[in-house]
Image (spheres, grey):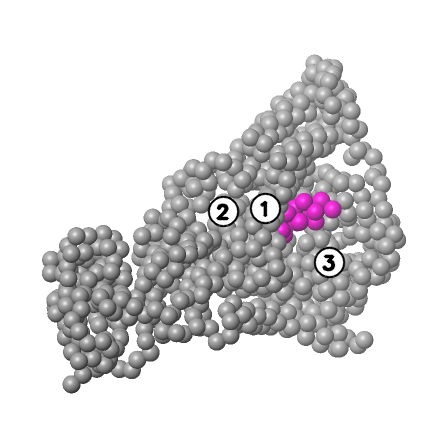
Amino acid sequence: MNEGRRERIALTLVIAALAGVPALLFGYQAVAQQRVAPPGTQVFRITGVRQAPPHAGTWTLGSVAGGNYWLHRAQPLQELKVAQGAKVALRIGSADVHHGFSIPALSPDHYDIPPGEWQTIPLDTSRTGSFPALCTTKCSPYHDQMWFAITVEEPLGPPDVTMQVNVSEAGGFQPARIEVQQGQIVQLEVTSSTDGTGAGVGFAITGYENKVDLQGIHKGQTRTFKFRPDQPGEFMVYSSTTAGPAIDNAIGTFVVKPKP
Amino acid sequence: MAPSGVEQTAPVPIPIPVLKFPPDDLRPYGRVNLFTRFPWLERFCKSRWFQFALVVPNLAFFWLFLLVGIFGTPVGNRNMIIVFVWILWWVVLIAVMVPFGSRAWCAMCPLPFFGDWIQRRKLVQVRPGKTYGLNNTLFGKGIRWPKQLSNIWIQNLAFLGLATFSVPLVTRPIVSVFVLGSLFVIAAGMALIWRHRTFCNYICPISGFLSLYSMAATVELRQKSGDECLKCRTKNCITGSDKGWACPWGVYMGKLDRNNYCGLCMECVKSCPNNNIALFARPSFTDSRLKGYDEVWKASIMTALAASYSIVLLGPWWSIKNWANPSESGQWGGFAVYAGALWFAALVGLPLLLAGAVWLGRRLGGRQQPFKAMFLQQAYTLVPFGLLAWIAFSVPLLMVNGSYIVSVLSDPAGWGWNLFGTAHVPWTPMYPEWARVVQAGLLLVGFAVAGRKGLGAARDAHRTTGAAVASFLPVLLLLIFLTSIFLRLYTG
């Protein structure tokens, strides 16, 4: 073999090593991510991060890796919105300490999330509403902040009417009476002024519990939710999250006027 | 006239087992030419592909380690860079490669790959020509490294500095990425300015301890016949030829009598016109002379670090562990205490104890040897002692944490892969109940070899056995003291 040919072969091998390693690594990752759930499933990769403040105790959709973990730039996930009936799976992992994971309103299951490992959790999207997803292991001093909301909505178009509701210990549900038309697409914007007993407040409508059940709205948060009331009548609004006597005893009225 | 004090101190027979060992430094040692025994090995070493074939796979692995260190999980025991570098590679290096392969790692190390490429502009072939008096064409500025820095002091301090931050280094992927990546960059940058493997010879923190402990290795690359080297007029081993590069380590094979600074690149095997260089198998700890204070302090640093690592990485002392891990614990005051104690022990405490023991031994032995010569001779005892202490630290590391290798193999970046179905293998220590026994056994072997070598050196330097024993006694007591500390640390 002549010298030039040897060098060319060697150069090819070096380039193959330097280019091939990242190609294989990231290429396989792209393939592997599609295999974690059945075809057609939308997979959300969510990482639990203990981290130091300001983003202490968060779940995040962002990539948390060796290279950025120490920069403390994980964007906290507050709400994950999915469409009713969609095939959805959550890929839950931990970037540092032992976490747990559960969506108590949707399933009694709870999952162990050891550091560096991943769990694929199919999400039940049959029921609309907004439900808290929590860390179930006392993971760190920031454990109580480790939650986010999963909101399952009907796939509706733009809203016909928007109703803003404030929930507070002093005033209960304000406005106390909400009136909408049957068949309208209603957008609720529910803001909480209190954390209640720590789990936030809820917003649910009797007779519409399977459609409207917004749980765990924390102080200062606004939960936006669309639905189409199809049954006329006068219904009671209450907190579906236990939030202490002031909120638990507060009642509002939701009126659905029949179509003219 | 015999120096005073010989008669006073000589005839005190001390019934300790190490006295039964003969001082083997006085004898020519038996060695076996591995090239004769295994002709395929000679063919491989003489092939121009030799080093390329060893380095490029490691280059690919280290490139993978860097990538998974940056983009993979920050969880150390689920990230390949931590598990493969600081558990697998480290244990193989210290417990297998160095004792049995000398500086075999240096032959396959990818860190200087780009530097070599910059200087040679060839990956496999040799470039004949004339550059600074050598028979090869080399590129880069080719400046000589300053004479005053031509020792391993920088490596000593670099290794001690890195080791001070060992806890974040061996648990946080990004810290390992930073350190390994920096070594690649520094090696390449230095190759642009200084000639040959200046980085490996004088800067690389890994190279420093490899040079020291390679003295223990059971292989050596040497001339077959010293006479042949004397007759040789071309000295192609150090000047290069059209068959091989001039020794990148600056070693002249005619004078090579220790493994310390030979990187086993096998260029001299190829360039020697007389076929006078071969790889030999030999008894372990055959090289038994330290040649400078830099090597003595390296031995001291390594011994102190073996103790420190056993405390902060394997020990039950959580407050000290937190001090050693300030980025996690935030205890920077405690870290200052820990770092200060470590540097003091490595740079002052242990050398001072050794110097004191040698000073006392010299008086007891009748001052038959200059202090420096005796200090260098007896400091060698820290080589077998320190190496075995490191092996005693490292082997149980593999026994306890080896199962991480199995799981990380299937999921190198901690992304949730399961390539070989082993990703979910739980942490399973292997025979942890035997770890203490293994550690105690290794420490005692280290003590025995150190004692044997120390006594051998003393016998070389003294006219009577009594004087030799007396001169060695304080060092022996120091070794017993160190062994008991290590036994306490390792076995509780």
The residue shown at (78%, 30%) is B23
> Disc 1 or 3, which lies upstream in sequence?
3
User: Is B195 located above or below residue B442 in the figure?
Assistant: below
| Residue B352 visible from this viewpoint | no
Chain bearing mark 2: B
The mark that comes first in sequence, 3 or 2, is: 2
Residue behind mark 2? B167
Residue B148, percent from left and from top: 59, 49
- Per the image, the residue denoted by label 1 is B428
Quadrant of residue B476 within the rendered picture: top right
Taking depth in this image into account, of A170 and A95 the one nearest to the observer is: A170
The chain letter for the residue carrying disc 3 is: B
Report the magenta stretch's main SS: helix
Residue under disc 1 on the same chain as residue under disc 3: yes
Against B294, residue B185 (above or below) is below
Tell me the residue that label 3 is attached to.
B265
Distance between the Cα atoms at labels 1 and 3? 38 Å
| Residue B267 makes an appearance in the image | yes
Tag 1 subunit: B
The magenta stretch spans which residues? B87-100
Quarter of the picture holding the C terminus of chain B: top right
Q: Which quadrant holds residue B396? A: top right
Instruction: Residue A151 in the image: state x and y as whole percent.
Output: 32, 68
Q: Tell us which disc is closer to us: 3 or 2.
A: 2
Q: Give the mark nearest the N terminus, 1 or 2.
A: 2
Circles 1 and 3: CB distance less than 8 Å?
no
